[in-house]
Image (cartoon, grey):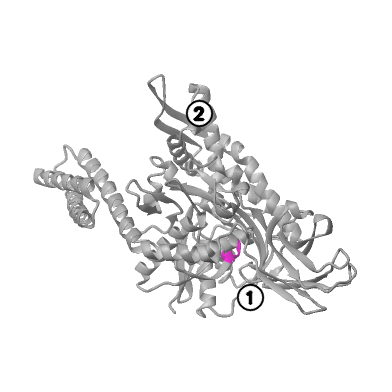
Amino acid sequence: MGRVIGIDLGTTNSVIAFYEGSRSEVIAGTNGDRTTPSVVGRGSQGEWLVGEVAKRQMATRPQQTFYSLKRLMGLRFDEVADITNKLPYEVVRGEHDLACVRVDDKPMTPVEISAMILRALRDRAEEMLGESVERAVITVPAYFNDAQRQATRDAGKIAGLEVLRIINEPTAAALAYGLDSGQTKSIAVYDLGGGTFDISILNLADDVIEVLSTGGDTQLGGDDFDQAIIDWARQEFLEQTGVDLLEDPMARGRLKETAERAKVELSQSLESHLQVPFVATVDGVPQHLDLTLSRARFERLVQPLIDRTLECCLAALEDAGMQPLDVDDVVLVGGGTRVPSVQRAVEELFAKMPNKSVHPDEVVALGAAIQAGVLDGTVEDVLLLDVIPLSIGLETLGGVVTKVLERNTTVPARRSQIFSTVQDNQKSVNVHVVQGEREMAVDNRSLARFELTGIPAAKKGVPQIEVTFDVDADGILKVSARDLGTGVEQEVCVRDASNLSEDEVERMLAEAGERHEEDLARRRRAEARHTAEELLLNVEETLEKSLGRDVPTAECDRLRELCERVRDALENSVSSFEHDELVEATEALQEAAHRFADFIYQGSH
């Protein structure tokens, strides 16, 4: 059957890993990159771009470059109102009221676009491992609801993967952290990713990893830290020039890139310079954004976001029946945990230094690979006990929710409860399944509705209807209702009304298969262009800096000649023939550049 891979499908970056021997390892790309930006773009020629090449066009084609899709996965259009005004691309209402993005004047689901990321990761795994990859374990935020988990599974299926298990991200991180610890301890996994925040309290004992509680916020992450910088820079520029940068999609895309860089810089430096030349025009005069953001100001901007994560931590501790001091170790996961004020806040809450022995960007994928090893028999004697993040129940008389499965129930789980009719001679019962912690059904997420018919005429309260909830190890739900008097039964695999139907998933899978070779060829052409453009810029810069050095004129002339050849190939690279010419020209320039570098370094001694 081939090996099973582990995938961390992240909001900002995605990582793929596999288990071999006695450890899991990240699968790097041909250029050594260990993460793939979770960005998909529609190129100027109609081609689909995935990863770094898509991210590069974020500033120039913002309305056709899609990122933070994880925040839209499985959600209805009305549920994403707070997100849409922060994105340069258009989010629209699709079929089944699903939140979709506009691509070439038509809606496209986040599931289908996320499948392109998963397909690119699968292609990388097959290329680097030299074998077919058809099965995977995919991680999701612990606080993802049933619809979001179903959407993630659908994305995997469209990518041509059999998704053996959906595993919570903090649980995967704990698996990678705790497998070799050989200790009995309680740990808190603080996971601040690009778009979501999770906190899980776990107990590690021998080879058993038990999740005691989990909490979080699926609309809180590093993107919001970026947005805090964007909002500040926007207001500063508005006061200086009277121009609102967020009204221009291209300016918004450039500001997004600048904010991301500033956030990263402020984790190492005390201040960052935000510079965006020619970002706007006032009365025909170009305007440049040039601001200095100090770490102190940045920390004030994001403190409310950090406080929200701490509130989730305290709630999870309460659910686990623990105090912060009861936790033996705190593990930081996700790129957002590199922010110094985040680390300080976690240290102050738990009164201990967070554990930094695990790589925050890779640990989730490594844990997913371990779970993949468990499922294919490579890893033995490891038991993982996960939980459901949100309570599941039924709407009963008066619109009240009766909870059948409480949050933090260990999965897989099966619970039954007896209900009855509310009217005399009632011949059917409507079963409305909801998920959430609110007391009234209307305030929670509706998962499914179905009707149990054929109930004999009787006084209200006499019939006995047994409703059974089954949650599998992925946290995905099945519900059945049975009349104990007649034995009439109906079962439904809960599939949220806003999710794709099985027919739609199959159609998208077929379309993905049909266009895969074409998409792969286009992606390789785009990657070749990216490599050639970067090399060209680097070589031309090297030539400029080498003026006056003792380098043979013939070598300089040869390098300039090859640069011109690459430039010509870039202008013509549309068909496969011209693509081959571009690859050959790039390889020749790379070889000449290496030889040129040898002359430079020999001359420096």
Q: Residues within 10 Å of mark 1 (few under 14, many from 20)?
A: some
Q: Nearer the viewer, residue 245 or 293?
A: 245
Badge 1 is on which residue? 206
Q: Quadrant of the N terminus?
A: bottom left
Q: Is residue 199 magenta?
A: no
Q: Which residues are magenta?
A: 167-172
Q: Which amino acid type is marked by label 2?
A: Asp
Question: Dominant secondary structure of the magenta stretch?
Answer: helix
Q: Which mark is residue 244?
A: 2
Mark 1 or mark 2, which has the lower sequence index? 1
Q: Nearer the viewer, residue 340 or 38?
A: 38
Would residue 27 be visible to someone looking at this image?
A: no
- Who's the residue at 90% across and 69% down the image? 459
| Disc number lying in front (1 or 2) | 2
Q: Nearer the viewer, residue 214 or 99?
A: 99
- Who's the residue at 13% across and 45% down the image? 561
| Residue 81, quarter of the rendered image | top right
Task: Name the spot of residue 598 as percent of width and height, x first.
Answer: 19, 52
- Who's the residue at 18% across and 46% down the image? 568
Q: CA distance from mark 1 to mark 2?
A: 57 Å
Q: Nearer the viewer, residue 434 or 145?
A: 434
